[in-house]
Each structure stands twice: as C-alpha cells, then as structure tokens.
Amino acid sequence: MGLGGVSGGGIGALDKVDRETMGARVYRDLRSLIMAGQVSPGDRLTIRTLAAALGTSMMPVRDAITRLAAEQALEVLPNRTVRVPIMTRARFEEVRTIRLMLEGHAVETAAGIVTPEALARLRALHEEFTAEHNTGDPDPAALIRINKDFHFGIYEAAAMPALLQIIEGLWLQIGPVLNFDLRSKSKRLSERVALRHHGDLLDALGRRDGPAARAALAGDIVSAGDFILRCGSLV
Amino acid sequence: MGLGGVSGGGIGALDKVDRETMGARVYRDLRSLIMAGQVSPGDRLTIRTLAAALGTSMMPVRDAITRLAAEQALEVLPNRTVRVPIMTRARFEEVRTIRLMLEGHAVETAAGIVTPEALARLRALHEEFTAEHNTGDPDPAALIRINKDFHFGIYEAAAMPALLQIIEGLWLQIGPVLNFDLRSKSKRLSERVALRHHGDLLDALGRRDGPAARAALAGDIVSAGDFILRCGSLV
DNA sequence: AGCCGCGATATGTTATCACAGTTCCAGTCC
DNA sequence: GGACTGGAACTGTGATAACATATCGCGGCT
C-alpha cells in the first residue's frame, strides 16, 4: 500500500495517537459532571472509588482532583477528603458580583469587535435555545449546554483569554447549585426571562452597543441569581 | 509531670504534628519562588530535578506542579514539559485591565467596612515600606514582600474570599515579570510614585472614601504597569 | 446505660518502578 | 561538508505497593 493517495486512506487518515493523557480525560469527565450538576454539593469523592469507576489507577484521578481543587471546583477538607463544595448564600452572591464585573466587561468588549460570523453562530444558538424551550418538555441538560455555549460564545469574542479562563472558573464553582436548582424547580418562568435577556443581548451586540449588551447580560445574571436565591436551597 | 499547669508546658505547648503534606510544602516553596521572581519566564522545570533539589520523590513535585499549572502560574507545553509562562505585552495588559476591575472593587468595598485595627496594620506596613525605601540601598525582596502584604491587607478587609482568591491568582501570573523587572531596572522613580499612591490609598481608606481609594489604587497599578511596559522586556 | 479504648477498615500520601514519547548528539552516508 | 539516521539519555505518565492517618464499630469498663 502506498503512503498516500489510497482512497480514504493515506497518512492523514491515521488515527491520531491519543495525545490526551488519562489525567486530562478524567479531569474533563469530572469537570463536566460537576458543571452539569450531576454531583450535588456536599458529595464526597474518593480517589479509589473514582479510579475503579473509570477503570484507571489512582494516579490520573489524583491529578484531576488536584487540578479541580486548585480551581475551587472541589474542596479538600482538613481530613484530606474531597467533596463538592457547599455553596452558601454569601458565597453565591459574591460570585455573582464578580460575574457581573467580569462577564459584563467581556460582553462590552465583545460588542465592539464581534465578527459577523460569530454573531451568526450566536443567533443560531439562540434559535436552538428557543426551539428547545418551545418543546413541550424541554431537556434541562440541553438547555444548560446551549446556554453555556451561548454565553461563552460571546465571551470568546472579547478576545481576552485570561479573562475567559477566570470566567470559566466561576461557572465551574456555581455549576452544581445552578444546575441542581434549574433541574428540580419549576423553570418556565426563569427560562422565559432568560430568552428575553438573550434576545436583548443579541440585539445589542448586533448594534455594537456595548453598554446595552452589558445591561442585558446583567439582567440575565441577576434574574437567574434571584431565582436561585429564592429557591432557598442555599445554606 | 501533670498534664496541665506546668510552667510553659501543658498540652497546648505540644508540637503541632506537621499536618502539612510534602506536596503542600513543595507547592508553597515553588509558589514563593515564582512570586518573588526568582525564576525567570521561559525557565523549564523538570520533576526529577526539583524532586532531587527538594529531597523528596517525584510525587509531591507532581502535585505541586499540577496545582500551579491549574492556576496558570506554570505552563505545560504540548511536549508535556512545564515552564514559567512567558508574558506577552497583550497578556500583561489584559491582566492589568482585570486587576483594575477586581482590585478596584476590593478596595472600594474595603473602604466601607475596614476596621480601625486593620487600618493600623496597614499604616504600620506603609511606614515599614517608607523606611525600607529611605534606606540607602533598599532590599528588593523586602519591598516586594511589604508591597504584597500592604495590598492584600486591604483586599482581605473587603471580606470577599472568592475575589481574594482570584486576585492572588493574578498576582501569581504577573509575579515573575513584575519582580524580575523591578529587581533589575532603576527603581527609584517607580517606588517614589508607589509611595505616593499608597499614601493616597491609606488616606482614602481612613476617610472611608471608596471611589477615592479605587482611584488611588488605579494610579498605583497603572503607573507600575506603565513602568514595566516601558522597560520593553515583554515580548 | 453511657463513655472510653482498641482494633479493623477505608483513604490519602509518598515512594518506586515500568513504559512511551521526546530531545539531542554522534556517526554515517550521499 | 551537510543532511539524515541511529541510539542513548531524559522526562512525563501510569501503575502498584508500602505507609500514616482518619473513621467507624465493637467490646469492656465505670
């Protein structure tokens, strides 16, 4: 067999050697688990259990947990055991304040330099979000994913990688409680207003109106946060 | 011997068993090394070398490096080797923008609730800073330490732990270049203006004038940043 | 019956080893 | 003489085992 030219073959078709370490994979798995709210605040994780569940040894799990703990996505107790952090009301409000500053700045910056292509992608995401919502029984997981893609699509347009990193960390911290509540409570109301805010945000971006974009985002964050706070499940 | 009451003895005098893991110690050592600018951007670190230098095995070093990398204090190249991140001008300016938002908010918040005790500690720190500066040959390491204690003394007064954590991460990222430059270049000028800004900041805090405190801090951050940028050592 | 001490179990930590990918240098061939 | 190839040394990753500590339960003592 020749090295190139064979239909569908060739060197380019070689399996990319999995250049991802197991530690990275475990990290990604755990991270999405946390972000999707599939672990509840207070849950304790043990290295051996996770290693067994994932079919690896303790080492990659250890790596992943260390990383997540450094990002405050997990918490190491004085006993050295790790658990999903419990979110207090004060902490939630503090994170919300920081989000308003950071994500507000991101959207305001993005409004000035967003490309038409990025805008088109965002509109598509918004339509997808609307469609899923208009379903008789919206899938919470899908809504959460689309919402996240929509927000971060904007933040990425700001072209501030360090800022983006910090915002991701904040979302990781509030992920469990956010999704946990959205999943269980009646969500019609909060989603309706989310749709409106997203629409306003999109309009402002289209007009390249930074302050308006920031205001729309603030409305989104504040209203969603108020909803969570009213749920009363925060200690 | 009785368990209590012996002069200077008693249970309370027992050595606290060192509840710190080796990984935590290595992490702290490396962290201070980075913050103090004793490693230069671009320097590559190897696990085995560090382990040998610190007299431990590879494991604790691995832990520490994983953690530092998660905090962006170290950088893992696609080759899997880790190095002290090289700071580009764009990245430096981005971090400065974020610092202005976050640290600005922290001092403004602190101004409203700072206690007299905390204020006294800050004044003492400022006097120490002034004294060290008035020395014929100020010690860069001491100045850096005092400056850090002064800033974080204020940030802690804001009582926003999550915010504090993020700010620490930002300082960790800019630590190498910051100190590296302050150490080598003529620093009289920049320190003089730092003294003035710190004084203004202290005055504003004493008056509980949040906006003025934020303005003074902004002056400090911007002037120091301009100094670094003018040095031209950033790529 | 309640509290204390002891031991069994579970869990995080560290060390050591084996392996794979990378880097670098020397030797060799064109 | 220069580019390529070969291997040796190096380095991060994953696995396993030994160890220290924390947690929990059981039995005996008060």
Image (tube, coloured by chain):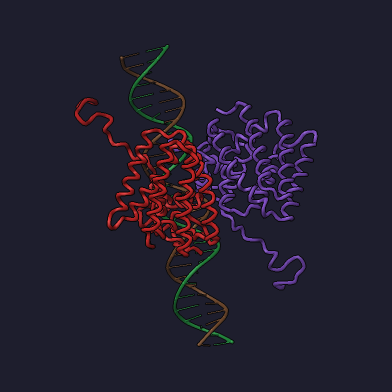
Chain colours: A purple, B red, C green, D brown
Picture quarter containing residue A133? top right
Residue at 47% x, 51% y is B221
Picture quarter containing residue A183? top right
Residue at 58% x, 45% y is A102
Q: Nearer the viewer, residue A109 or A35?
A: A109
Residue A57 showing in the rendered view:
no
Q: Nearer the viewer, residue B176 or C6?
A: B176
The picture places residue C8, in percent across and down from the top left corner, at 43, 31
Residue A17 showing in the rendered view:
yes
Residue at 74% x, 31% y is A188
Tell me: residue B133, above or below residue C4.
Answer: below
Tell me: residue B41, above or below residue A106.
Answer: below
> Is the C terminus of chain A in the top left, top right, bottom left or bottom right quadrant?
top right
- Total labels drawn: 0
Residue B3 lies left or right of residue B29; in this view the side is: left
The picture places residue A115, in percent across and down from the top left corner, at 71, 56
> Is the N terminus of chain A in the top left, top right, bottom left or bottom right quadrant?
bottom right
Q: Nearer the viewer, residue C22 or B7?
A: B7
Tell me: residue B83, above or below residue B154.
Answer: below
Q: Nearer the viewer, residue B45 or B222?
A: B222
Residue B14 lies left or right of residue B105; in this view the side is: left
The picture places residue A210, in percent across and down from the top left corner, at 66, 48
The picture places residue A123, in percent across and down from the top left corner, at 76, 48
Residue at 43% x, 56% y is B178
